[in-house]
Structure formats: C-alpha cells, structure tokens
Amino acid sequence: MAKSYTVSDGKMVLSLEEAQEGGFIVTSPLDPELITEADTVNEAFSNARDALRALRCSRAMLWRKTRLRPSTKERALR
C-alpha cells in the first residue's frame, strides 16, 4: 500500500501519494480537479501551482463560452 501525506506551504494544501515508479501523485483536497506528479515536495508545490493556473484559465474560458452562448429560450425568441 502506497504511503500518502498531506502537506502545506502556508498557501496550498496538497495530498502526496507515493507512486510505484517513484515520486508522488499530487492532488488537492480543496480542488478535486487538480492532479499532477512530482519527484520532490518542492516540485509538487511548483507543479501544483502550474496546474492550478491552467485550471483557472480553462474554467474562465469555459465560463465565458457558456455566458456568450445564447440559451435555447433566447434562440427561440429570435
């Protein structure tokens, strides 16, 4: 059974699970969509920050896309 750890740098909380091939599988208990991998704890925080930026960008684009698309009701009124 792989060991798992919860770590924080004061800004982020991460769950690290030892990977069979070495290093860690990195997730966040505060954001279930955040997942990455790393060889060290420092790299885990760096990779998690990068993944979080990518998630925020993706979510913002999706939000804009859904806000700009007329609803079925609005299309029927045209």
Image: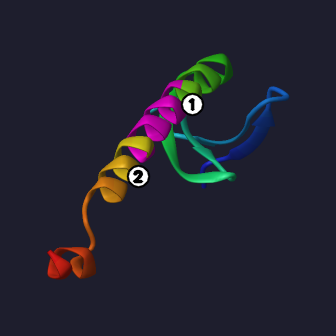
Tell me the kind of residue under disc 2: Trp
Q: Secondary structure at mark 1?
A: helix
Find disc 1 in the rendering and name its residue: 48
Q: CA–CA distance between discs 2 and 1?
A: 22 Å
Determine the residue positioned at 61% across, 51% down: 31
Find disc 2 in the rendering and name its residue: 63
Q: Tell me where the magenta segment starts and ends, as one range.
A: 50-59
Mark 2, other Cα within 10 Å: few <14 / some 14–19 / many ≥20:
few
Q: Is residue 52 magenta?
A: yes
Determine the residue positioned at 67% across, 23% down: 41
Point out the tag, 2 or 1, that comes first from the N-terminus. 1
Q: Is residue 23 magenta?
A: no
Q: Is residue 66 above or below residue 56?
A: below
Q: What x and y, as percent, mark residue 18?
A: 59, 40
Mark whose residue sits in front, 2 or 1: 2
Q: Is residue 28 left or right of residue 56?
A: right
Q: Which mark is residue 75?
A: none
Q: Is residue 78 above or below residue 25?
A: below
